[in-house]
Image (cartoon, rainbow, N blue to C red):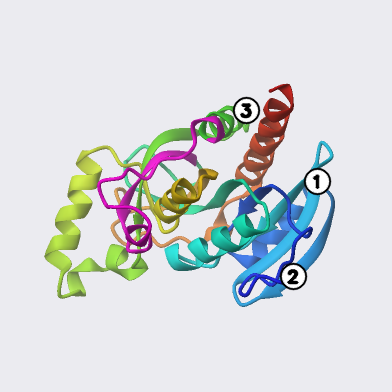
Amino acid sequence: MKQYHIACAEGQVGGYVLLPGDPGRCEAIASLLDNAAFVARNREFTTYTGSLLGEPVSVTSTGIGGPSTAIAVEELSALGAHTFIRVGTCGGMQPDVKGGDLVVATGAIRMEGTSREYLPIAFPAAPDFSVLRALADAAAQSGAPFHTGVVQSKDSFYGQHDPGRMPVGGRLEADWRAWQMGGALASEMEAAALFTVCAALGRRAGAVFMVVGNQALDERSMCHADEYDKAPMLKAAVAAVRQLIWEGREK
């Protein structure tokens, strides 16, 4: 039976899944796999499946934000997926986190709502260590500048970019300064939900991002993602999956 939202059935997805937000990025990621083929498309969810080292690997887009990410992970997990890597864009929050850099998340600030329906807010949103290590290794070998650290996950894109016009703008601006002072590297919209949902389901997760703007340098920074070459990020994510497959076989 096909899953309700992603329109995939048993046997159509691999145990390892790469999760871009943009459906238009799925084909580019799938081209880095062996023998990848289109599987399904429904709403924001587009899926391709191929292989690495003979192991089935899938690419499924999640759309923007925590709710649709959680749906994708739930339904992919029901089909046997066990390892998830978010592959997307983010905005830098520190002056040295610049456009074109990679960020590997070591944790996520749960400034969103989806994760609260899985685990209490005191539970940390953290990646699986083996996935984190594989992503950090791959980022170091990518040739692009990279950073490892905490990211901030939010629900409102414009709450970040134009908080002053929001009735709760004072709180948003104070929180933003607090995250920066605490060393948060970047802002994005999916990692906290991904990490928390996977923790609740007993699955592994990690996340690698490409920086496409930086409000610490430009308070109105809203660069279009297409201004940066995504190849280092995509190749790092695929290399991390390849490393995880090797490690799984060695065990």
- Magenta extent: 102-131
Residue 36: x percent and y percent? 82, 54
Badge 1 crowding class, 10 Å Cα cut-off, few under 14, some 14 to 19, many 20 or more, is some
Report the quarter where the N terminus lies: bottom right
Q: Are marks 1 and 2 in contact (CB under 8 Å)?
A: no
Gap between marks 1 and 2 measured at Cα: 17 Å
Residue that mark 2 sits on: 40
Helix, strand or loop status at disc 1: strand
Q: Position of 163 compared to 20: left or right?
A: left
Along the viewing direction, whichever of 98 and 42 lies nearer the viewer: 42
Q: Residue furthest right?
A: 35
Q: Position of 55 compared to 112: left or right?
A: right
Residue 124 position by quadrant: top left
Helix, strand or loop status at disc 3: loop
Along the viewing direction, whichever of 113 and 144 lies nearer the viewer: 113
Residue at 77% over, 56% down: 49
Residue at 68% over, 67% down: 46
Residue type at mark 2 is Ala
Badge 3 crowding class, 10 Å Cα cut-off, few under 14, some 14 to 19, many 20 or more, is some
Q: Residue furthest front?
A: 1
Gap between marks 1 and 3 measured at Cα: 22 Å
Along the viewing direction, whichever of 232 and 23 lies nearer the viewer: 23
Residue that mark 3 sits on: 141
Q: Position of 199 compared to 215: left or right?
A: right
Gap between marks 2 and 3 measured at Cα: 33 Å
Q: Are marks 1 and 3 in contact (CB under 8 Å)?
A: no
Which mark is nearer the camera, 2 or 3? 2
**122 falls in the magenta region:** yes
Helix, strand or loop status at disc 2: strand
Residue 119: x percent and y percent? 34, 53
Q: Is residue 212 visible?
A: no
